[in-house]
Amino acid sequence: MNVLITGANRGIGLEFCRQLTGRGDQVMAACRSCSSALQELKEEAGDRLQLIEGADVTSDEGLDSLFKSVEGAPIDLLINNAGLMEGVTLDHLDTPSIRRQFEINAIAPLRVTQGLLDNLSKQARVCIVTSRMGSIDDNDSGGSYGYRMSKAAANMVGRSLSVDLASRGVSVALLHPGYVRTDMTGGNGLMDTNESVRGLIGIIDRLGPENTGLFWHTNGEVLPW
Ligand SMILES: NC(=O)c1ccc[n+]([C@@H]2O[C@H](COP(=O)([O-])OP(=O)(O)OC[C@H]3O[C@@H](n4cnc5c(N)ncnc54)[C@H](OP(=O)(O)O)[C@@H]3O)[C@@H](O)[C@H]2O)c1
């Protein structure tokens, strides 16, 4: 399977690269700049891992450069993983931060997917790594304005894509990775990237037209919107 992952240099994106190359998939790892951990993985994975740097998914230049790097390459699985979480409270309504989070969490997955439509193979799968914090039903603790708003919008992007791409046989999943120990959470969480990504890959492997457009927890539950 040919896979493209954004935000591949650390955290959950890096672990996707590790597990997918480990089982023999061909992975295009898109990132703004390569980390030493991704470099090390490249040494292990060899030809199974292609590094694509300069892929800032919020800038026109970054997107153009990403699309050029993979021109003509078939993609069976696209994982929109790059994301940003910044705290925005009612007391400190930092609107530039809200906009930044919208750009990366909601608008980028749409632009990346749209720009790669010609690459998507028949029956390709498209995923957006979203968050349970974008669930309106599940929100009983408030706050986190920019993150919650942008992930709720990401969920809507995914649901619309699932409708619009159904006739091409492309299936879409919104994936909540759990509360995972990464830089984003300051190393706090209930699980490591290894466990989170193992669960997510299990969901991706079962993704098809019959279950497109759903919002999944890494533990296999379907989450409420
Ligand atoms: N960790 C959790 O508990 C948790 C829970 C729910 C959802 N999520 C979601 O899971 C995804 C991965 O999160 P993580 O925990 O692995 O976070 P992370 O360790 O902070 O990694 C974030 C990744 O996104 C990339 N990124 C940020 N802005 C970018 C941009 N403009 N263009 C391209 N790449 C950009 C980062 O690249 P740089 O190194 O260049 O900054 C990095 O690779 C995110 O979408 C996040 O919202 C995480």
Image (cartoon, grey):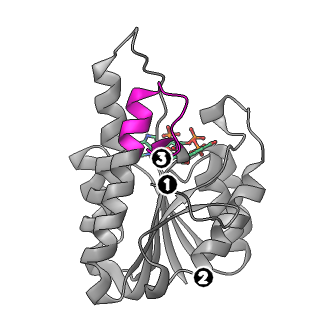
Task: Give whichever of discs 3 and 2 has the lower sequence position.
Answer: 3
Secondary structure state at the residue bearing disc 1:
loop
Percent coordinates x, y for residue 217 in the rendering: 62, 59
What residue range appears in magenta? 133-151
Residue with the mark numbered 1? 81
- Which one is closest to the eye, mark 3 or mark 2? 3
- Residue 60's place in the image compared with 142, above or below, is below
- Residue 116's place in the image compared with 97, above or below, is below
Few, some or many residues within 10 Å of mark 1 (<14, 14–19, 20+)? many
| Alpha carbons under labels 1 and 3: distance apart | 23 Å
The quadrant in which the N terminus is found is: bottom right
Name the side, left or right, on which 99 lies relative to 180: left
Residue with the mark numbered 3? 137
The quadrant in which the C terminus is found is: bottom left
Residue type for callout 1: Asn
| Alpha carbons under labels 2 and 1: distance apart | 19 Å
- How many circles with numbers are drawn on the protein? 3
Which labelled disc corresponds to residue 183? Answer: none
Q: Observer-nearest residue: 43 or 135?
A: 135
Few, some or many residues within 10 Å of mark 2 (<14, 14–19, 20+)? few
- Which one is closest to the eye, mark 2 or mark 1? 2
Residue drawn at x 68%, y 43% is 179
Percent coordinates x, y for residue 176 in the rendering: 57, 54
Is ligand 1 within 8 Å of the beta carbon of the residue shown at mark 2? no
Is ligand 1 within 8 Å of the beta carbon of the residue shown at mark 1? yes
Q: Is residue 139 magenta?
A: yes
Quadrant of res 205: bottom right
Residue type for callout 2: Arg
Query: Disc 1 vs disc 3: Cβ atoms closer than 8 Å?
Result: no
Secondary structure state at the residue bearing disc 2:
loop
Residue with the mark numbered 2? 206
